[in-house]
Image (cartoon, helix red, strand yellow):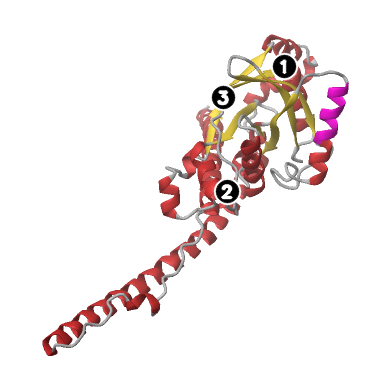
Amino acid sequence: MATKQTKKYQQPTATSINVESSVLLSLIRHTSENYPSLFSGALLGFEDDEGSIDVTHAYPFPYPDQYEGGSFRSRSGAKYQQEILESLKKLEYGVEFQGWFQSTVSGNFVTTQLIEGLAQQQLTNKNAFILIHNMASVGKEVELKAFRLSEGFIGAYIDGKWKSKDLEANKLTYLNIFDELPINIHNQHLVNLYLAGLDNEAKGEKEFDVLNLSSNQNVTAQLLESLYSQVDSYNYDQNNFNYYQRQHQKEVSKITQWKQQRKLENLERAKRGDKELDTEEWRGIFKLPSEPSRYNNMLHSNAIDVLADDILKKCDEELTKSFAIERKLTAGDSQ
């Protein structure tokens, strides 16, 4: 869980991401060919005068990730990243580290490791971002999104406070953990030309893939399994919070009864002319339980939201296939 930071938040100056076509093709090829293994890497480039980040180079880490964000703050990852930068500087390439890319399946990228790495990087480099390649649609379409942690999240992260009142103070919910940045592909016509020049047989198979009525069980099952895991983690965290609420309510009831009793005692003492007893003495008798952090709850909620959206999209595809099969069978029976 994030703890209090000494660094201050700086407002980002870059509001969009420009990606070179060569970077996009290299990234997609590397993550797709190694799927279902997850890969991440460094994105290098520069910030232009128009408030955009130009990504000109992408270098995957030379090993797969055990979980999303695992390589961002590891020693081996930092060393590899630094070696790449030094090599490019020797060749007089004027590029700097701008962010990371990460392959993932739907909302699984919302991990404490990824969030921690991105938050620390944004406090060092205000324009840092992460490029997420969603592999839930691998082989059918490319889904890339650029994210940056929101100002509200960074504010809570700097304070290191994650109670309900702290989230309210920063106007932070699971829906606004991230700010999404628009992505522009430079020389996109080159990407289209490359894709058009792929092997005709393989291309033909993909064109007719839409006619395949069999369910895509592997991806759907993976999404459901990820959703179950996130819901289990959410329920565990929520049960701890519910227990806190019950204990808090019990203590509040005891304190209320104590105050009422002390009030009656003071009324009796006033009638006798005696000095009133301290009405704040309860603070040394009772101790209200501390509210648990809502940090993990918020991350799980965000992941569940993204996973649920992707599952709904898959359900739409499966329903379309089911209706097509039903109509075909009905037509066959009527003949």
282 relative to 170, above or below: below
Q: Is mark 2 on a helix, strand or loop?
A: helix
Most common SS among magenta residues: helix
User: Which residue is labeled 3 in the image?
Assistant: 13
88 relative to 5, above or below: above
User: Which residue is labeled 2 in the image?
Assistant: 227
Nearest-to-viewer mark from 2 and 3: 3
- Residue 21, labelled with which disc? 1
Sort mark 3 into few (<14), some (14-19) or many (20+) by Cα contacts within 10 Å.
Answer: some
Q: Nearer the viewer, residue 255 or 40?
A: 255
Find the residue positioned furthest to the bottom. 272
User: What residue type is disc 3 on?
Assistant: Thr
Q: How far apart are marks 3 and 1 (CA)?
A: 24 Å
Residue 30 part of the magenta-drawn span: no
Q: How far apart are marks 2 and 3 (CA)?
A: 35 Å
245 relative to 14, above or below: below
Q: Position of residue 263 (x, y in %)?
A: 20, 79
